[in-house]
Each structure stands twice: as structure tokens, then as C-alpha cells.
Amino acid sequence: MKPLHPKSRISVAIASLALIVTYFVPIWRIDLWAPQYPEGLTMKIWLSKLSGDVEIINGLNHYIGMAHIKEEMFPEFHILPYAVAFIIALGLLTVAFNNRKVLVSYLGVLVLSGIIALYDFWKWGYEYGHNLDDRAAIKVPGMAYQPPLLGYKELLNFGAYSIPDIGGWLFVLLGVVLITAVVYEFYSSKGDKKPAKKSNIKAAVIAALIGMGGVLQGCTQRPAPINYGKDACTFCKMMIMDKKYASEIVTDKGKAFKFDDLSCMVKYMKTNQLKEVELAFIVVNDYSKPGELIDAKTATFLGSKDLRSPMRGDVAAFADKATAEVHKAKFADAKLLTWQEVFANF
């Protein structure tokens, strides 16, 4: 059996050793949002413990009869540290043996481990969300509260979002590296027999990198589209209709809040004591390009009572100062403002 290419060995070694980081960071997270918790609640799952707002979540779950979450209910916490050590060791053995069959076996073990882990998580979620106390204060016939295995799910007035955390993404990275290495080695072996196929190696590597980019892009936060005529303002509850004045904030946990007027957004931020460092995005409609969202912190604002915005904040945003200057001449007593001035005035 031909040995591995040096690039494959180095990549597998680095990706395997990167799993050491999982002992010091959470591997999974479940985020919950509700109107009474605009900043959200988070439970983080580590290799051997839980962290985050676990006790607050337990207090809420008590009313619907869900079991008390505690670390003792997870025997996996005693197994996972050793399982990860085994995967790291297997990765280093793959590099040491320098054998393509061992590389494929390593990938198979990782995939099987992932399937088992996801099934175990789903099984716990099913039992946790379905086995409810009959003496619960709140009962909804036929309602179950199983958290999502991956992605978003609505549970009564809460939205639940389940995704990998830093440690989980390191496992995903290892999987991508192993798949790339296997594909690379496969096409390399074909290239040994037919040199003309060398270009296939480059195509396979590019395809794998594109796939990795897709994974990373999937976890990237971005502002949610505003559905004009359907979405309601989070602050004043009015329907968002005007594409010139709408705005939106997105928390660092990915929760989006939409507003029909800039004044509503600022008042909501102040009422809930939301700090800019806690927000992934603060975006506003570009007055000159209705419906297009721009970064509020870099925008130029124009204030005038003649603007007559939906909730009479009467402030419009522009992507650049030159455009704002042009519109300033159209309104009486118009004044150019910065984001800091807008925030301070409402």
C-alpha cells in the first residue's frame, strides 16, 4: 500500500491535535429566546460538564413538567473525555502508520462516532421533552418540548436553536480534513497510473475547500430579511410597511429584532439595556435605496420633521455623506447626524 502524501499527513496531524482544544471549550450549545428574555438564555455542553443559564432554564421548565437538568443525568460526561483522547490517538497513529487504509478507517471511526453522538443527543432530547410531570402547572394537550437536534424549533413562546459550539466545529473541521485527504489520496493513486489525471487532484482539493467554505458560511450570522407588510415592529408592535425607515438589530446569539422606525430601535435598545458590543448587527434602511439595509454605525443620518417617519422619529439613514447632503437641501431645518448623536437623542 502506498504511503500518504506529506500534505495529508500534516493536515491530519494538525486537525487531530486541534481536538485537544475541546477539553477547554464547549462542544455544543442550545439557545432559547422569548419576549421576556430578549437577550436569550444559553446552555453550553462541554465534554464533562454543563454551563450557562442552566438554573434559569430549569426554573422555567419546572412549570411545564420537564425534568431538572443536572450533570449527574449524563453518564456520557464520564466517557467523552476518553473517547476524544482515543480519536486524537487514532489520528496520530494514522500519521505514524502512513497508510491509506488506516486513513480511511480513521474517517470511518469519526463518522460512526458522530452518528452515535447525535443519536444519543436526540434520544436524551426525546425523553427530556416527552416525559413530563403530570402535576405541572402548565399543560398543553399533545404538546412535547423536545429541543431541536440541529437548527431552530419553536416551543410555545420560546424559540430554541441548537448548534455546535467551538469544540463541535473542531470535529467538523477534522471531518472535512479527513474527507479532503481521502479524496486527495484516491486521485493521487489514479494519477500514479495515469499522469494526465493530475488536474483531477486540484479539482478534488478545490471542491473540498468549497465544501469547507460552505460549512463555515452556514454558521455566519447575518441580518434577517424584513418582510414588509408582514413583520411587526418589536417595540411598538405596528406593521412594518415603509422600506425607507425600517431597522434591525441582531444579537451575538443570532436573534433578530425588527423595527418600523429608527426611534423604536433605539428606544428598545435603551429599554432592554442592550450594548453595542452584545450585538452582531445594527442595520437601517438606506433612505435613497428603499429596502436596502446598511450598517448604522457607518451611516450618515439626516434629521428633519418634514421626513415624517412612521413613529415620528423623523430620521433617515444614508450609506454615504454625499447622498445625505443632497437630500438635506430638500427638507427644512434638516441636520446631519452621526449614529452616536442619533442614539443619544432618542
Image: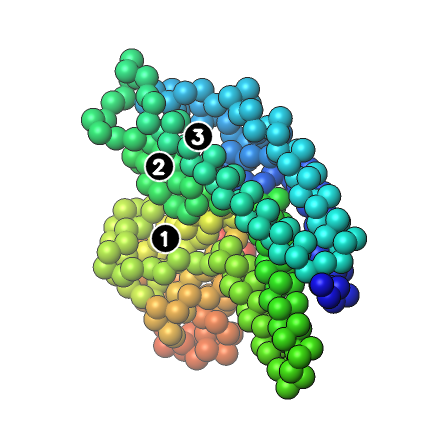
Q: Colour scheme of this structure image? A: rainbow
Question: Disc 2 designates what residue?
Answer: 158
Quadrant including the N terminus: bottom right
**Quick check: 271 left or right of 91?**
left
Q: Amino acid at mark 2?
A: Phe
In the current view of this chain or complex, which residue is farthest to the front?
1
Q: Earlier in the sequence, mark 2 or mark 3?
A: 3
Question: Disc 3 designates what residue?
Answer: 124
Q: Earlier in the sequence, mark 2 or mark 1?
A: 2
Q: Position of residue 58 (x, y in %)?
A: 44, 23
Q: Is residue 143 visible to the viewer in this orientation of the structure?
A: yes
Residue at horizontal 34%, vertical 23%?
Answer: 131
Of the numbered discs in the image, which one, if any, rests on residue 258?
1
Q: Secondary structure at mark 3?
A: helix
User: How many discs appear?
Assistant: 3
Q: Position of residue 280 (x, y in %)?
A: 52, 53
**Eyeballing the image, is 343 above or below 148?**
below
**Quick check: 148 left or right of 8?**
left
Image quadrant where residue 75 sits: top right
Q: Amino acid at mark 1?
A: Lys
Q: Is residue 308 visible to the viewer in this orientation of the structure?
A: no
Q: Secondary structure at mark 2?
A: strand
**Contact flag, marks 2 and 1 (Cβ < 8 Å):** no
In the current view of this chain or complex, which residue is farthest to the left?
141
Mark 2 or 3: in front is 3
Mark 2 or 1: in front is 2
